[in-house]
Amino acid sequence: MQRATIYLIIIIFSVRCVDPINLLSPETAKSYLIIDGLLSITGTTAKVTVNTYRSSFNTERSSPTLVDQVELIDNQGKKLALQRITVGVYEATETPEFRFELNKNYKISVRFGGDLFESEWMPLLPVPKINSINQIYTPETTDTPPNVEILITTEFNDSHTTQILRWNVIRAYQITEQIEGGSPGKTCYVTVRDDLLGNTTLDGRVLPKNEKFRISATSRRINADFAEDSYYSIVLESIDLNTFKYFKARQNLVSREGNLFETPPGQLFSNIRCVNDSTKNVLGYFYATQQDTARIYISPESVGTPVKLCPRPPVETTPCPAEQCCNCLVLRGSTTRKPHYWR
Amino acid sequence: MPGAFSPATPQSLRVPVSLDLEKGRESALYISSEIPLTKWLEFILGYRLNHFESLGPRRIYKYRDDIISEENLEGFKIQEGTIRTYIQPEPRLSMKLSLGNSAAIKAGYGRSSQFLNQIFNTDVPSPTSQWQMVNHVFRPGVSDNYSAGLFLGSVGQPFEFSVEAYQRKLNNIIDYRDYAELFVNPHIETELLQGQGESKGIEVSLKKHKGVINGFVSYTYSQTIYTIEGINNGRPYFANYDQPHNISVILNYQPIERHTFIANFTFRSGRPTTAPVSSYVNLDGVYVPIYSERNALRIPDTHRLDLSFNFGRTHNKAARLKSSWTFTIYNVYARRNPFSVFYTRSTRDVPTPQANRLAIVGTMFPALSFNLEFE
């Protein structure tokens, strides 16, 4: 009896409350063609980039996809063919015959598997200039870790019709290989996007024109990435209201954790459609913007001289407890070629 | 108290938010009359007049071009007193046609109004669910209900059978937009939309009152579909409480008066859910899940068998106090019924959408109870 009671208690309490399940069947799992496009003018460089992917329920099977033809079309019907850079990446730059003009409308067209996909017409929006870029370092306290915040100032004028902004945050840092007791090896320059999970949009439609305002572009906890020279680049873009909603929705989906307090999910909307068959599964977004970039150098001393990752003391199993201390090229976005703006 | 959000520490960057009290006043006038036309045919007419006032003080938000959305929010004013009044007439008519002593056909129409709605952002109501009162933005929900059924059996007969069909036309139902910020949102009207719905179904039940084996079997098929402009691209979708199949079986076996064996089986279809159906990783390395249309998938069905043994009931029929014991095994075959399903990304190198089932009592569970009956 006693043994039976123990078994019963074990059975009851060994069952987990949460377990993974599969809701999808082959009929409900879907594959979409994803078409993302950006037409941008940065300084004197004007280019259009289109990325094409095939989605899958199993993310490992999603992949960049080769398509048959990609074109940019202006509102006078002129076409510019994009060249394939690699699988799923297509680019073209401005030509004397096909100019990229602010406030003019453009759309992209993609031919794939006998179908024609087109985006909505999108205006090439002018962007306000970044007037200044600064850093604010907050040392460690008993409650908060050390932190650096990057701020930019800008202002809208009469040419800015939408007053909605988006920005990319690009962080580049230097790391030098070294193992315990050895001499320094090669130096790598690692470029990462820091805006992929955070909120990087601002609806500034209530802001007065011709008055400077400040944006907190990003904020990051100080770690070993800041132990050598590093840079933050902020690339500011103008977007319209629908594009703003698209990025907010995508941001919501990307950063979901599955807790009770989260906002309910929804379908990712798109401004791409299949012209000849409205039932085709296609998603993605095309927008056009002028860009303005500001960059700031972050010296290790300005952020509290953090401890370097390398060298690290070896452990018994491996002489290289942190792989990047033996080969810094293993890091995503790493190169030994020094960026043109580096000191 | 509708809610508040306060920073936990002085260092917190959270801006404190406190929601206005929801206040309303409801009153009603009701008259009804029974009209027996013949011995076999009877009508009941009724009329209810509802009066509802949404009361202040509360914040009334102003929107650019009167388009209610977070992007068009311009500010607010405080309004006192009665903010909006609704007068909702509710006519009712029911008919009973008797077919002898133990059979009847019943049919009815009735309109009902709803001034309070529950809003929840999960697949099931949860502690984060909230109540939303009708106000200057949200109109009362109105449903027109039609039903007709055949009823067989009467008091004293061993069997009772009924079959009844119904249809409801729903107006001003409330549901949330995609990505709605429902949690302590002072201008929740930017996150909710109203539209139409339709609910219909058929219920069949059979009861056996007498005998060593007696019990109850019922089956309901129902369907509730919403159509709301701004949700699911304006296309119809299943309401989140739509559970088409509902089966209930209760069997009592009473070989002697002191002991009763009870088997209770229930089955409900899984609730609809909005779930990831695809995903991709873009060139920046960002994993993007793609969700289905609103409520296009279903969480697993819920079913359970409970067995009970009631024993030790006193023989003495004249006793004013009767006691007995009941030993119950809930969820005999240890079904892990989902209370809710939520979605995370798997922890593999390349993240993949993962559905997770939360089962509150996902195993067999014994219980022993002592019963006292006073007569």
Image (cartoon, coloured by chain):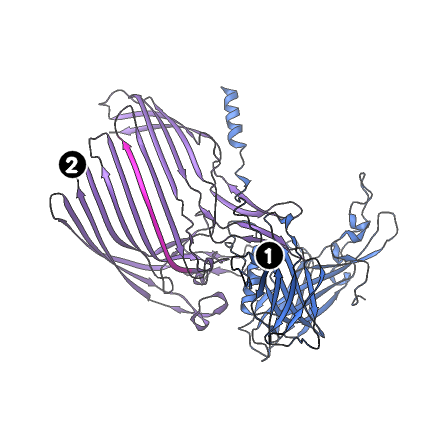
Chain colours: A blue, B purple
Q: Residue at x 54, y 32 (%)?
A: A14
- Nearer to the camera, B108 or A32: A32
In what quadrant of the picture does the N terminus of chain B appear?
A: bottom left
Give whichever of B280, A5 is nearer the camera. B280
**Chain for numbered disc 2:** B
Residue B17 appearing in the image? yes
The span shown in magenta is B193-210
The relative height of residue A254 versus residue A151 in the rendered view (above or below) is above
Residue B216 x/y as whole percent: 31, 33
Q: Are marks 2 and 1 on the same chain?
A: no
Q: At x 31% / y 41%, what residue is drawn?
A: B203
Place of residue A185 in the rendered image (x, y in percent of width and height, measured from the top left): 86, 53
The residue type indicated by label 1 comes to Leu
Residue denoted by label 2: B101
User: If the image is split into quadrants, where does the C terminus of chain B sit?
Assistant: top left
Residue A33, labelled with which disc? Answer: 1
Q: Are marks 2 and 1 in contact (CB under 8 Å)?
A: no
Residue B263, placed above or below residue A129? above
What is the residue that sits farthest to the left in this orientation? B38
> Closer to the observer: label 2 or label 1?
1
